[in-house]
Amino acid sequence: MIRLYRAPWSTNVQRVTMALAHKRLDHEDVVIAYEDRSPVVAISGQELVPVVDFGDGEVVADSMAIVARLEQRHPDPPLYPPEPARRAELDDFVDWFDRVWKVAPNAIDAGADASEHAAAMDEHLDRFERMLIESDFLFGRFSAAECCAYPFLKYAAGRDPGDDESFHRILEEHQSLEGRPRLASWIERVGALAPGAA
């Protein structure tokens, strides 16, 4: 049985729950408190969630590394394109999202001046709107790209009242769907497929 170490409202955990749901894989949740990360440290040697224990001695940390490993172990239904060039494009997208897209909201959360970083977030939303011109999904069909981006971009459409994470408030406050109908439709469409993050 796959065991998923998670914390409430985690965007990175939702990446993994989306992949598990898409692949119809049963799993057991181990919910930790942010103030006591000892179960995660004990299983993985580091403090961050998500962590997956595959039950056969393999433990993987980092959300998108887990998604990629789920694909290797359970290839159907797929989350990555079979063509090497398209797979490389999707891998580049995930790398861009984690190394570039996340910079602005993380900087605001750390106390940086919001104006400059909010402008970058706005430009990134325009990129997503363009990516959806020819398809309902970022790479033509539901894929690891949705698992990567949706848990963060969904805040442009609002936030669950029970979710009081400061990072999520920033995502809600500095992302707008005005003038981005394709992105708004994508958030609604993917949201219908995605398990919640609570």
Image (cartoon, grey):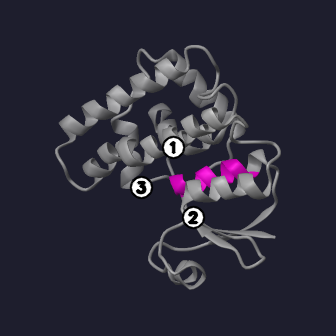
Residue receiving disc 3: 165
Residue 197 shows in the view: no
Q: Would you identify the image quadrant in which residue 138 lies?
A: top right
Q: Would you identify the image quadrant in which residue 119 lies?
A: top left
Q: Which amino acid type is marked by label 1?
A: Val
Residue receiving disc 1: 94
* Left or right: 89, with 166 as reference point: right
Count neighbours of disc 1 (C-alpha within 10 A) and say few if under 14, some if 14 to 19, many if 20 or more.
Answer: many
First of labels 1, 2 by sequence position: 2
Residue at horizontal 65 percent and vertical 33 percent from the top: 190
Q: Nearer the viewer, residue 105 or 85?
A: 85
Q: Position of residue 14 (x, y in %)?
A: 60, 52
Residue 131 shows in the view: yes
- Residue 8 is inside the magenta segment: no
Q: Which is closer to the viewer, label 1 or label 2?
A: 1
SS label for mark 3? loop
SS label for mark 2? loop
Q: Which residues are magenta?
A: 9-20
Residue receiving disc 2: 50
Q: Position of residue 167 (x, y in %)?
A: 38, 51
**Cα gap from disc 3 to disc 1, whole angstroms:** 23 Å
Q: Position of residue 147 (x, y in %)?
A: 61, 44
Q: Which is closer to the viewer, label 2 or label 3?
A: 2
149 to 5, vertically: above or below: above
